[in-house]
Image: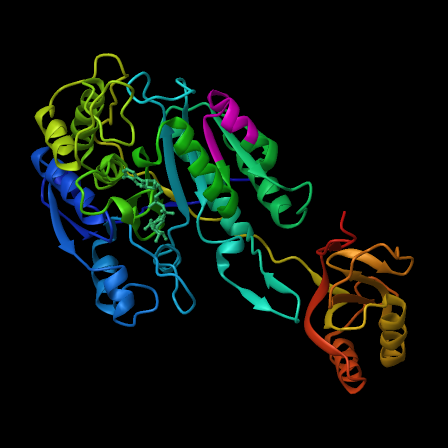
Amino acid sequence: MTTPELSKTNGSTGTTGAPVPVTVARGDGIGPEIMDATLRVLTAAGARLAVEEIQIGEAVYARGHSAGIEPGAWESLRRTRVFLKAPITTPQGGGFKSLNVTIRKSLGLFANVRPCVAYPPFVPTRHPKMDVVIVRENEEDLYAGIEHRQTDEVTQCLKLISRPGCERIARYAFEYARRHGRSKVTCMTKDNIMKLTDGLFHRVFDEVAADYPDLVAEHWIVDIGTAKLADTPEAFDVIVTPNLYGDVLSDVAAQIAGSVGLAGSANVGEHAAMFEAIHGSAPTLAGQDAANPSGLLLAAVMMLVHIGQPEVAERVHNAWLATLEAGVATADVTGPGVGPVGTRAFADAVIDRLGQQPTTLPAVTYPAGQPQLAVPTATARPAPAKTMDGVDVFLHHDDRDPDALAALLREAGDGVGLDLTMITNRGVKVWPDGLPETFCTDHWRARFQSSRPGAASRAEVVDLLRRLDRAGLDFVKTEGLYRFDGEPGYSLGQGQ
Ligand code: NAD
């Protein structure tokens, strides 16, 4: 695979010394307190920011905006293209959309980068050598939000994985590893079960890895990989993974490094970037001056690097490390015998140490003059030849006798040119030769295939559906059985 063109994330002007426009939201719960602490530290450190505030979260949901953000706020986000965001409280119940998912997808923030680092002995952890960065795909997978109830008993969520999506996130992970002097990129998927979707992610990872021979590339099945991460995180360096696994893995990683209150994240796309703590709005801590501002502060450090102010990022990060070393900590991370300080006092302690370096923990350096980490675009590929073998018809059918259903389907579909070859229930083959022990729901899949591979037509599918309808069979969806350059693009579907 050849390295495709790399595009610039945004047009930041940080190196010129002029203030960089940045959109800021104070959020809900502990959000306003930790944002106030963070902005005070940034200002004291000499960050050149032109802050534009927008309101998001509870109050905006309450005004009837289903995603917790007002139309006018998008104008600021699209102009500044840099968003420092405090956590919000997501309202419970139907009718509300996740603000985070909406922002990530609307602005195309495809990469979620979460460094999870241990700070022994200042933050208690069982994994003192841990230093892992999770690069999570941010737009696809089960988070596409395409869900349907199809029958009385069965609901469905679509898992969408695209080749360009896989290529961009894999390439971003390798570019990130190179830029940050890391040596290994680990891909985690469940491709032993999801051979097409996770299989694509793994395959594209392997293809991209070939362009980075200086870096070790490996793959773990995500279940044992997560167990290994929880037990021996020092075995990992950079981890790249689809959206859902990344969501779980990054919280596990942050927690075992010390505290979810310590980790920041960057959501990066071609046109914009959003920086936030990984934790939520912790409503029970709100208004008590007790929350740890570190996650948002470290997210702001990533933002400073992104907008071309690495020298300020370095001052803030090292002052923060020196503060930890001085035993100053909020209640979520204090070790035995260390009295906690409040949010404001913690920020003051960081401000007092601006210009200092840590002495035990390794100091960080953010080299000046580096261009922004480029955002990869996907390689253009010729379209494969697409043919159709047949169709899977999903049915809502209350009677639980597979043989009786097969008889109905064969009678209804007789003469169409597509033969009934299989019936499954929740992916398990129940006809022909099913087992009476198999538990069946009211949701069936009937596979109809042409006798010759690639010879089925859409007209035959429409004809089949018309006949099933006439026979009173309630089809709830169809999936075409396609071949791409002769390769089947569908699973055997026998619960393998
Ligand atoms: P949470 O992260 O808010 O809290 C989990 C636990 O961690 C709580 O015990 C909390 O007190 C503690 N905690 C979190 N941040 C802390 C900090 N900075 N300092 C000290 N302790 C901290 O998760 P939750 O309770 O599941 O969610 C609360 C709300 O936040 C929900 O409405 C949820 O939807 C929302 N949420 C928002 C975001 C976001 O805006 N990015 C992310 C996650 C959750």
Residue 348: where, in percent of width, then height? 10, 31
Q: Most prominent secondary structure in the magenta stretch?
A: helix
Q: Is residue 253 left or right of residue 406?
A: left
Q: Is residue 479 left or right of residue 172?
A: right
Does 337 appear in magenta?
Answer: no
Which residue shows up at 49% across the image and 61% down it? 145
Q: In this rendering, is residue 279 above or below 211? A: below
Quarter residue 375 falls in:
top left
Does 228 appear in magenta?
Answer: yes
Residue 248: where, in percent of width, then height? 48, 41
Is the image coloured rainbow, by chain, by secondary structure, or in one colour?
rainbow
Q: In this rendering, is residue 250 above or below 105? A: above
Q: Nearer the viewer, residue 391 or 147?
A: 147
Quarter residue 334 falls in:
top left
Residue 288: where, in percent of width, then height? 18, 43
Q: Is residue 278 left or right of residue 452?
A: left
Q: Is residue 213 left or right of residue 288?
A: right
Quarter of the image that includes the N terminus: top right
Q: Residue furthest top?
A: 360
Which residue shows up at 76% across the image and 50% down it? 495
Ligand 1 is found in which quarter of the picture? top left
Residue 356: where, in percent of width, then height? 13, 19
| Residue 398 visible here | yes
**In the rendered structure, which segment of residues is drawn in magenta?**
227-239
Q: In this rendering, is residue 107 above or below 474? A: above
| Residue 379 visible here | no
Which residue shows up at 79% across the image and 81% down it? 468
Q: Nearer the viewer, residue 436 or 159?
A: 436
